[in-house]
Every structure is written in structure tokens, then in C-alpha cells.
Image (spheres, grey):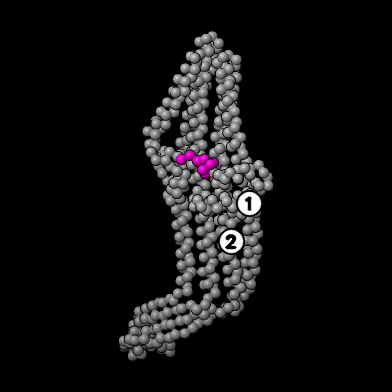
Amino acid sequence: MKHLIKSTKWTGLGIMFLVTFTFSAANIYGQNDSTLTFYNTIDQVLNDNQGFAAEQAGLQAKEKDITIARASFLPSFGIQASYYVAEGRKINDWDRLGVSTGTKGVLSGGVNQMIYHQGYFANHKIQKDLYTSQAEQLRSSRYQLIASAGQAYIAVLLAEELLKVMLNDREITRRNLDAAIYRAEIGSASEQEILRWRTSLYSADQNIANQKANIKVNRITLNQLRNQPEEQIDTLENLTIEKDGFIFTSTMVKNSIGDELKEQIIRDYFVEIGLGKSPLLGSFDAQISAQEHQLKSDKLWAIPNFDLVVGIDDQFLIVDEGNTPSNQSGADFWFVGATMSWPIISGGANFSKIQQQKIVAQEYQFQRKQLLTSQEQAIRSNVSMLIAEYQSVGLTQEQMQVANQNYELVYESYLTGEMTLLNLLDAQHQRFSAYMTAAVTYYTFLLDLLSVEQTISYFPFLQPQNEVDAIISELENRLL
């Protein structure tokens, strides 16, 4: 019973150590009382990240190009005034001293309204397409930022989970040390075994210290994305497959894993969603549209352009021939008219430009097909990896339970002398490796899921739940 009492005592001390560690970390680093949820983290990053704010400002500036292009459709009004000294000679009187001098002023104004100018209309459409292209690029940057924030968040969760495994393994080592001390007291073990377990404790403490530093590094990365103080510590909401697993929250989908035909249906469904929502394809399509408008404009080079013109001209001060200035006010004349410009021939430049635009359009189509193929390949590959990771999660959980049971059996046999030090070391190592592998596999699955969501441009945690449920329901119908 003595060894059991000691084992219980050290287990209780281990719990106290974990509580003390958590409390100390909260005091040292200023941990907040509230829990930082995954959704709130993403929302904070999107609102406070300075780099993304700069990209949004760039899109707003691009929007002004549309306003500038639209201004050509509106009436333009201008006033021009001049005042100068006039000096003149008669052309046949250069040999005489007679000079006519005086001052002169001119005030004129006019209104111009463009009726049709194919270049202006084309430019307006092109600017709208370029704005759409940049807006899609911003959407792509937004998804990249969401993925980066999510990866940083999950990296902190993984680092903290690994620390828990290390702390638990340290308690196991402490427990083994107690067993060695007990065995030495009854003459079943040597002092060397005690020293061996104490050495293991020092190694465990070193690993724990390094892991704490790793947690700090991951937290700094997350805080930088959130534009928060780098040393700030928040309690993070844990993520689970049952709650945050997207399609893997569905029992039917989970039961379909392992069936190759149904796995292909899942991949096809993700490809359908991803290609329909792709910001990269959207941006490229907008660029193609802009190029097509430019080509159409170049082909219409021979169509006349029309302007409606209204003007007024008032010369309020002139000089007469007698070298005596006289005032004259009122409008000299006003006019309303229309102008037409028709660039019938501009050399071979227009024809060469049209041919160039056709080649560029062909190149764009080839690039779009290549982009479409690469995106489909990326989606299928990522979903395949995700499915494999999901299967690994279940296997590592089972392996963890088996390794724990094996350790407990070896530990009991070690106490009775049926197993040696090496047997217990091996059992503990297997248990530690199984727990570490299970933690890494679990959070790697969540990271891969986030990567798939980025690839298909759909993050379910940012969408209404009824919409997410509809997507899952549609997939379930296809799996029937």
C-alpha cells in the first residue's frame, strides 16, 4: 500500500502544479479573464490589421478612377480671362516711329457636352472592370489573412496542448521515480534507477521550458496579426471536430470516409464550390473583360465622335486705331453648335494595335485555363489530404489509449519486479509519443481543414449557420 499512497500523493501534487502554473502565467503575463473565441479573433484581425487596411484604401482609390472616367459624360463649363498690353506697328511702317499702344482684355466662357465618344465609353467600362479585378484581389487577400490568423490561433492551441502532454509526462516520470524509490527501499532496485529517473525529470523540465518559449512565439505572431500588444495573453477557445469540423460534423459524411466512390463525390463537391467562389478566377475574368472592351474600342476607331458645344465670348476692353483705349462691355457673341471628329486614317498603328489586342486576348484565355486547372488540382489534393488526416485522427486516438493501457500494465509489473527499468522506460516513451502524435494529428487536421476552406474560398465560421447547414445537406443528398 505504501507505493500506492505515494503515487496518489504525487498525482495530487501534479494537479496542484498544473493549477499553480496556470495561475502564475495569468499573473505574470496579464491574462485576460474573458475567453478569446476563434470568430472574434478573425473579426479582430480583419478590422485592425494595418496591412489589410492599406489594401482597402487602395481599392477605394481605384474606385475614384471610375468617377473620373464618368466625368467625361457630364457637361463641362469653363471661363477664360486675359488682360495684356497691346503694342503694334503697321507692316509697312517699320522705318517710321509711329507706334500704336494700349491695353486689351478678353473674357470668354463656354459649355461643352459630349454626346458620343467611343473612347470615353470604353474607358469607363475598362475602369469598372479593373476595379472589379482589384476588388477580387482584395477578397483573395482577405481570405489569406483569415487563413493566416486561423493558423496562428491553431498553432497556439497546438503548442498549449503539447505543453499539457509534456507536463503530464513529467508527472509520469515523477511517479516512476517514486516507484524506484519504493523498490530501492525494499531492496528490489539500485540507486542507479533512482538517478535515472531524476535525470529524466531534468530532461522533462528542459523540454517544458522550451515549449513555453514556443507558446510565447506563437502568441506573439497571433497578437501581431490582431494588432494587439505582443506580450498580451488571452485564454483561447478550444476547437473541436464535433463543433468546428464543417462537413465532418455530419455523421453521414464521416461514415462515407473510406469509400473511394463517396470520397470522390466529396472532392467533386468541393471543386464545384471552390471554382464558383474563386477570387483569383474572378479577378482574372475582370481583366479579360477589360481587355475585351479595349479591343472593341480599338476596332471602332473609324466611328465619328460628337460633341455639343455652347459658348460665350466677351471682350471688355480693346484698343482702337487712334491709340486711344475704349471700353466695350457686353457679349461679343455666343454660340451653340456641334462638333464631329472622325479619325478615318491613322496609319497602320490602329491595325497593328488590333492584332496585338487579339494576341493578348488569346494569351489571357490560355492563362485562365491554366489557372482553372491548377485550382481544381489544389482543391482535390487538399481535400484528399484532409480525408486522410481525418482517418489518422481516429487511429492516433486509439493508439493513445492502447499506449496508456500498456504503460499502466508495465508500471504495475515494475512495482512487483516482473518488469525492468528498460521496460518501463520503453512503455513511457511509447505513451509519450502516442499522446504527442495524437495532439499533432488532431490540430494538423484542423489546419488542413482551414487550408481547404481557403482553397474553396468559403469559411463556414463566417457564414450564417442555415447556409452552412444547406451546404452540408446538399452533400449528404449526393452521398445517398
Q: Is residue 201 magenta?
A: no
User: Residue at horizontal 46%, vertical 67%?
Assistant: 67
Q: Which mark is residue 49?
A: none
Horizontally, is 422 left or right of 331 in the view? right
Vertical side of 268 occupied by 330: above or below: below
Image x and y of residue 139, in percent: 51, 55
Determine the residue located farthest toward the bottom in the rendered image: 322
Q: Callout 1: few (<14), some (14-19), or many (20+) C-alpha neighbours within 10 Å? A: few
User: Residue at horizontal 61%, vertical 73%?
Assistant: 299
Image x and y of residue 460, in percent: 52, 49
Horizontally, is 281 left or right of 202 in the view? right
| Callout 1 amino acid | Arg
User: Residue at horizontal 47%, vertical 58%?
Assistant: 58
Image x and y of residue 337, in percent: 47, 85
Res. 39 visible in picture: yes
Q: Which residue is mark 2?
A: 285
Q: Callout 2: few (<14), some (14-19), or many (20+) C-alpha neighbours within 10 Å? A: some
| Magenta-highlighted residues | 237-244
In front of the other: 176 or 249? 249
Horizontally, is 195 left or right of 418 in the view? left
Q: Earlier along the polypeptide chain: callout 1 or callout 2?
A: 2
SS class, disc 1: helix
Horizontally, is 420 left or right of 63 in the view? right
Vertical side of 375 occupied by 167: above or below: above
Q: Which residue is mark 1?
A: 478
Vertical side of 38 occupied by 311: above or below: below
Mark 1 or mark 2: which is in front?
A: 1
